[in-house]
Image (tube, helix red, strand yellow):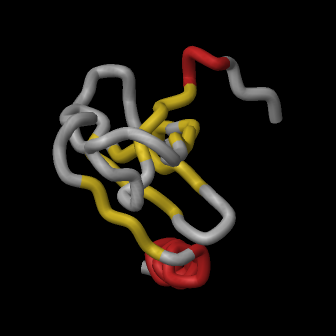
Amino acid sequence: MSTEASELIWFKSSYSGAEGGECIEVAVAWHKSSYSGSEGGECIEVASCPTTVHIRDSKDQAGPQLAVTPAAWSAFLTLATTL
């Protein structure tokens, strides 16, 4: 799947200090839930990385985010689809 540069969200590594020097920035591509409607409401966005799945509220993109392992996300999706 191709990701456009405008879809990427860059953030500095938590290991980078304020003084500059050696630091790294990481990009994640956010995807809105297929259950999200165009009228807003309760929507989530997910960004998958090899070791972490990031989850946020699509209405508050600068707000708090949840990060879980891919195994935990998979277990959650399995449980959610059986309810």
- Counting the numbered discs, the total is 0
- Where residue 2 sits, quadrant-wise, is top right
Q: Residue furthest right?
A: 1
Depth check: give the residue in front, 31 or 5. Answer: 5
Which residue is at 51% across, 38% downward? 30
Left or right side of 8 for 44: left
Between 7 and 33, the one lying in front of the other is: 7
Residue drawn at x 31%, y 63% as measured from the top left: 66
Residue 45 x/y as whole percent: 42, 44
Rendered image quadrant of residue 4: top right
Compared to 28, does 55 lie above or below?
below
Q: Where is residue 34 in the image (x, y as percent from the top left)?
A: 53, 41
| Quarter the C terminus occupies | bottom left
Q: Is residue 75 left or right of residue 58?
A: right
**Which quarter of the figure has residue 57?**
top left
Quarter of the rendering occupied by the N terminus? top right
- Residue 50: x and y in percent read 68, 64
Q: In this view, does 69 lie above or below 49?
A: below
Residue beneath the point at 57% across and 37% down: 29
Q: As drawn, is 1 to the left or to the right of 61?
A: right
Q: Which residue is drawn at 44% across and 52% down?
A: 13
Judging depth in this view, the residue of 33 and 45 nearest the camera is 45
